Image: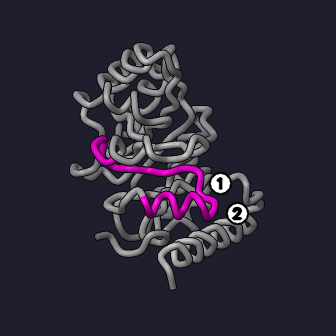
């Protein structure tokens, strides 16, 4: 099997599983955006995924995004999904269409200034740390409302929703908690779920899922 056929088959399977999970929760399949995460994989693989129908692509690191996003077709959107250091806000705002990792007021302010300097409206998600893990980025749930309110007031940022990366194990309760928090804050878009658990995430209300290895294979 060629690499193109492998990626196309994997992508089709993920889409089928997303559609089935959406149907189980009474939602149309088009209500879930698949973000194909290309971390460690070459641009050529992302282009094969695009040829097979993927239109949103995620990278964890600004440096990788800078290497790949400019090579994507015009109808593809680049999402930065990994932890973002404040000192990389300018680079991130220039290269990404969507940033899913706002976890502090300082980062939000820097991205707002950087997006304004680029003359663009930058779509963003506030990342929430639901598992209390010190090693994970994200604002604590109790502090999410204040950060959301601040981001909403920033003219160059367009707040779309909430994002989370739950601790390994039973992730469904964390997905349900993010959905409830989103409802409380009036945010309907939820970025949650990866290769191991995206079906549970969709069943719990995810509108974006971030899938890498299920599309591209084992990390290199």
Q: Where is residue 207 in the image (x, y as percent from the top left)?
A: 61, 50
Give the farthest residue toward the bottom: 1
Instruction: Identify which residue, 104 or 18, lies in the foreground.
Output: 18
Q: Name the residue under label 2.
A: 22
Residue sitting at 58 percent across and 68 percent down? 199
Does residue 56 belong to the magenta stretch?
yes
Circle nearer the N terminus (1, 2): 2
Residue sitting at 58 percent across and 69 percent down? 11
Please indicate whether residue 162 sits to the left or right of residue 186 in the image: left
Q: Position of residue 32 (x, y in %)?
A: 65, 54
Instruction: Identify which residue, 40 or 2, lies in the foreground.
Output: 2
Q: Is residue 92 visible?
A: yes
Would you call the spot at circle 2 few (<14 residues within 10 Å), some (14-19), or many (20 or more)? many
Coloring basis for residues = one colour
Is 20 above or below relative to 173? below
Residue sitting at 41 percent across and 74 percent down? 217
Tag 1 and tag 2, C-beta contact below 8 Å = yes
**Separation of marks 1 and 2 at Cα, in angstroms:** 8 Å
Q: Mark 1 points at which residue?
A: 32
Residue sitting at 51 percent across and 20 percent down? 120
Task: State the extent of the magenta-drawn residues as a range.
Answer: 44-64
């Amino acid at each position: 099997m060629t690499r193109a056929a492998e990626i196309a088959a994997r992508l089709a399977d993920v889409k089928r599983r997303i559609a089935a999970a959406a149907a189980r929760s009474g939602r149309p399949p088009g209500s879930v955006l698949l973000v194909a995460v290309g971390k460690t994989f070459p641009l050529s693989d992302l282009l094969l995924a695009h040829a097979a129908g993927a239109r949103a692509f995620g990278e964890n690191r600004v440096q990788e995004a800078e290497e790949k996003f400019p090579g994507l077709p015009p109808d593809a959107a680049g999402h930065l999904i990994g932890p973002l250091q404040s000192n990389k806000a300018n680079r991130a705002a220039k290269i990404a269409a969507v940033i899913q990792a706002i976890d502090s007021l300082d980062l939000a302010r820097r991205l707002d200034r950087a997006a304004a300097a680029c003359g663009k409206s930058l779509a963003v998600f506030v990342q929430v740390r639901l598992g209390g893990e010190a090693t994970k980025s994200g604002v604590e749930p109790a502090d999410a409302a204040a950060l959301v309110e601040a981001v909403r007031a920033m003219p160059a940022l367009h707040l779309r929703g909430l994002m989370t990366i739950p601790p390994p194990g039973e992730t469904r309760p964390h997905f349900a908690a993010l959905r409830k928090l989103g409802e409380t804050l009036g945010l309907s878009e939820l970025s949650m779920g990866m290769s191991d658990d995206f079906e549970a995430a969709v069943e719990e209300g995810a509108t974006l899922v971030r899938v890498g290895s299920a599309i591209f294979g084992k990390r290199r």
